[in-house]
Image (cartoon, rainbow, N blue to C red):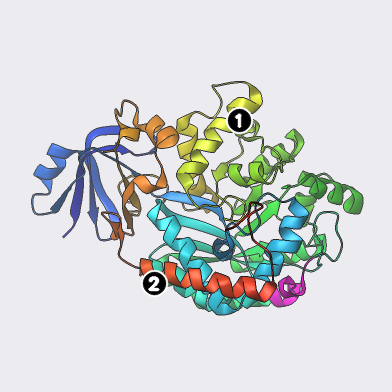
Amino acid sequence: MGYILGNATIITVDNDRRIIVDGAIVIKDSIISDIGKTPAMKAKYKDYEFHDMDNHIIMPGLINGHVHLTQALIKGCADDVSLIDFLANRIWRLMGSYNEEEARVSADICLLEMIKSGTTTFVETLLLSRYGLDGITDAVIESGMRGVLAKSVMDIATYASKDNIMCEGMIEDGDICLEQAIQWKKKSENAGDGRINIWLGPRPVGSTTKDMLQKVSKTANKHDMGIAIHFCEVKQDVIHMKNNYDQTPGDFAESAGILTDRTMLAHGIWLTKDDMQKLKKHKTTVVHCPASNAKLASGFCLVPELLEEGVNVALGTDASTCDNKYDMFDAMRLAAIIHKCRLLDPLVIPAETAIEMATINGAKAMKKEHLLGSLEVGKKADIITIDCNNPRLIPNTNPVSMVVYSAQGTDVDNVIIDGKFIVKDREILTMDEQAIMDKAKTIIKQVLSKTEINNKSKWKIV
């Protein structure tokens, strides 16, 4: 027998973009079996358990298109520093010191934060072997989330214009990475009742040669894997492709074989219109990470221009080292606001577009729009409810605007994945929240002690 969530305002994101007032959604097993007005659904399914969602908004679970699970533990450890200092002297040193236990704790605290703020699906871009791939997989399965896990691939220890900059603990062999990814996929693809997918995560072009990217492309084609890569995040990426290959980013990516309909290019800040046309041709997705791009002063992804060109744009938080939180409501708000200011045009990226980027566009990027990203009969029951009973969300005259401009992840009180309550009345049912937080507080001291990184405030501590 199934159950009903009713008496709510439902933002469906279906093909007609319906908003159902006094709506109800019917869940049976892992699937949405019906949706409509509450009185009709209650009369039709009299034996189903009814959950009263009065003064709630129901919407699809959010899809975070760019995540770093293993950076959640080190949030606040690299704030207000320049990009190369951020990476070489903070992030890589810390992460390059991880053992499997430390990486697992980071994954757990990240998953916990994402779930409780309404993310039901995510794409993790760079997982090193040292993190313990099986442990990370187990963490996602146990959490109940839906995740794409991408095995890192690299063949040179370079970033942007800096040679041999990467610390030893972050360096891997490219061919070994590819073989590990293949074996990981054979072992873990569709684990957790189909919630796990294994992809390839090549490092940016400064750390990955065109020859290696071509190997990535061939491996992805042969083994039915997607590709998640940082691309054109910094201007030096464009310079690198010009100086080393005499190509624009679009030409380089196309010739390397990484422009596909299951490639997610994180950031995409320095793409030109010609590059965008190539992305459209290959149905390649750009993942916009507004907070990360702003905090690191990387630049503005040209989201309105990408959308105008017909490129699919999804949304991500990036890592908690450069966003400091994994709250997709925050990402939606920033994505809807910053481009208005950049273009001096309040009409660009309306709230509706921001929600699409956080839901159905992410599903399209993963080639899962037939299952995820909207609330429709036959799709997976990945659903969140937003409790509007607080001053910030009252009066609720426009639910779409309310979600994007007023709501926060802390307003999510129920999270359902595959038809199962993962969070119910703000209590997470799949993870020991207090134990995870306690472990993270202990483990970070261990990591900082190993690396001797000074993470003190510039202000006097007394």
- Is residue 257 visible to us here? no
User: What mark, if any, has residue 339 been given in the picture?
Assistant: 1
In the picture of the structure, the residue carrying the numbered disc 2 is 435
- Report which quarter residue 203 is drawn in: bottom right
Residue 176 covered by magenta stretch = yes
**Mark 2 residue type:** Ala
Judge from the rendering whether residue 82 lies leftward or rightward of residue 387; answer left or right. right
**Image check: 287 left or right of 15?**
right
Identify the residue shown where x is 75% and y is 72%.
171
Give the residue at x 43% y 67%.
Answer: 437
Q: Residues within 10 Å of mark 2 (few under 14, many from 20)?
A: few
Give the magenta-colored segment's residue range: 166-177
Quadrant in which residue 71 is drawn: bottom right
Query: Which residue occupies the foreground of this view, 55 or 225?
Result: 55
> Marks 1 and 2, how far apart in space?
40 Å
Residue positioned 57% across, 66% down in the render = 70
| Residue 374 in sight from this viewpoint | yes
Q: Are marks 1 and 2 in contact (CB under 8 Å)?
A: no
Which amino acid does the dot numbered 1 rest on?
A: His
Residue 348, position as x, y percentages in the image = 56, 26
Residue at image position (50%, 56%) is: 122
- Where the C terminus falls, by quadrant? bottom right
Q: Quick one: label 1 or label 2, which is nearer the N terminus? A: 1
Drawn side of residue 417 relative to residue 218, left or right: left
Residue 393, position in %: x, y? Answer: 33, 34
Q: Secondary structure at mark 2?
A: helix
Give the crowd class for mark 1: few <14, some 14-19, many >=20 residues within 10 Å: many
SS of the residue at dot 1?
Answer: helix
Residue 309 screen position, x and y as percent: 64, 32
